[in-house]
Structure formats: C-alpha cells, structure tokens
Amino acid sequence: MVGIILAYKQVNKLSPGGWSRGLFLSAREENAAKKELEHLGFVEVVYMAKHEFGIMLDAPKKGKHYDEYEPWKYTCISVDDDDLANIVERLSTIDFYWHTLSAKGKGLAYYGITLIPPDSLKAFIDVIADISELNELKKLLEQALDKNKWMIHYGI
C-alpha cells in the first residue's frame, strides 16, 4: 500500500527549475505517464511517498477490518511523507485504531491504515496547528471535528 505521486520538473522561462505536482499513479500507469511527460518537455521525474486522509461518512463498524486501499471512497487528500515525518513522534500520544476498532493504539499506523476517532481530532489539530505545509490536512480535520466524524488515514 504505497501512495506515490509523480512530480515533474519542466524547463520553463516563467519558473525555471520549478517543481510541479503531478498525478496520482497506479503502477501500470507509471510508464505511460513518464513517456507523456518526457514528450511534453518535462526533464526530471521524482516519486514522493504520500499519506492519504479522508472523512468517513459512517463510523467504523465493530468487527470490520479496514484493510483495503480505497482513498477515493473517502475523498482523501494527499500529504507528503516528509511533512508528516516531522510530527510522527508528537502524534504517538494520541489514541487511534489500527485497521479495526479492536486494535487501539497510539499514533498513526505509518505503513498501514489508521482509524481516527472524533475525540482524537482536536489533539491531532493541536499538533499540526502551526505547520503551514499541513494547512489542508488541518482544514480537513476541523471539518471532521465540526461534524463529529471519524477519519481514515492510509499510510505509505
């Protein structure tokens, strides 16, 4: 379960050397996308590990295992691994569930699936409140908190 975003660099007079965010790709789409980007004049391709976060419409059900990678189901946003890596230790004091409600743990399931209960959202928001790179995640957490909704996290 690896979230990969293809980033690309284009030689461009308006933003020389600038990086642009690309597409979320499956493994089978990768080669075709690389060829198309090269054809369009993009000169360098980089892969960035991503985490996905989304709001669950319904609370997780007892006994159900959330083991499938389904970010589209929860309209997930992507967060760079580099941005999360700096706060992982601070999240390790917050209660979460790993893959199922019967596996309560502390911190994110970094390489797996985390179920984030509504009563842990405020603590999560407090950890990322002043990190500008995580503003989109903060807004999503606040939306879930306002609606008393669970969230789901897909690790790298």
Image (tube, rainbow, N blue to C red):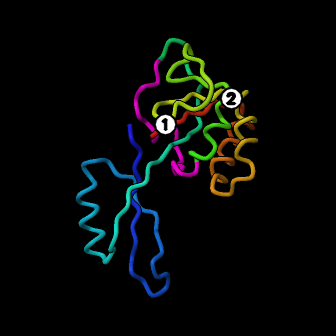
Magenta segment: 65-83
Callout in the foreground (2, 1): 2
Q: Where is residue 72 in the image (x, y as percent from the top left)?
A: 45, 41
Q: What element carries label 2?
A: loop
Quadrant for the N terminus, please. Answer: top left
Q: Where is residue 56 in the image (x, y as percent from the top left)?
A: 57, 32
Q: Count how many numbered circles sit on residues in the image.
A: 2
Q: Disc 1 residue type?
A: Tyr
Residue at the spot 74% in from the left edge and 48% down from the top edge: 129
- Say which of 132 and 117 sits in front: 132
Q: Disc 2 residue type?
A: Ile
Quadrant for the C terminus, please. Answer: top left
Q: Is mark 1 on a helix, strand or loop?
A: strand
Say whether residue 79 is magenta.
yes
Q: In this view, does 38 lie above or below 30?
A: below
Q: Residue 51 carries which label?
A: none
Outermost residue on the bottom side: it is 13
Q: Mark 1 points at which residue?
A: 154
- Say which of 50 and 67 sits in front: 50
Q: Where is residue 14 in the image (x, y as percent from the top left)?
A: 49, 85
Residue 90, picture quadrant: top right
Residue at the spot 56% in from the left edge and 45% down from the top edge: 85
Residue at the spot 64% in from the left edge and 31% down from the top edge: 92
Disc 2 and disc 1: Cα gap in Å?
A: 17 Å
Q: Do the residues labelled 2 and 1 touch (CB within 8 Å)?
A: no
- Say which of 146 and 1 sits in front: 1
Q: Is residue 130 above or below residue 105?
A: below
Q: Mark 2 points at which residue?
A: 94
Q: In this view, does 30 lie above or below 11?
A: above
Tell me if 115 is positioned left or right of 7 in this view. Answer: right
Tell me if 94 is positioned left or right of 41 in this view. Answer: right
Residue at the spot 43% in from the left edge and 36% down from the top edge: 70
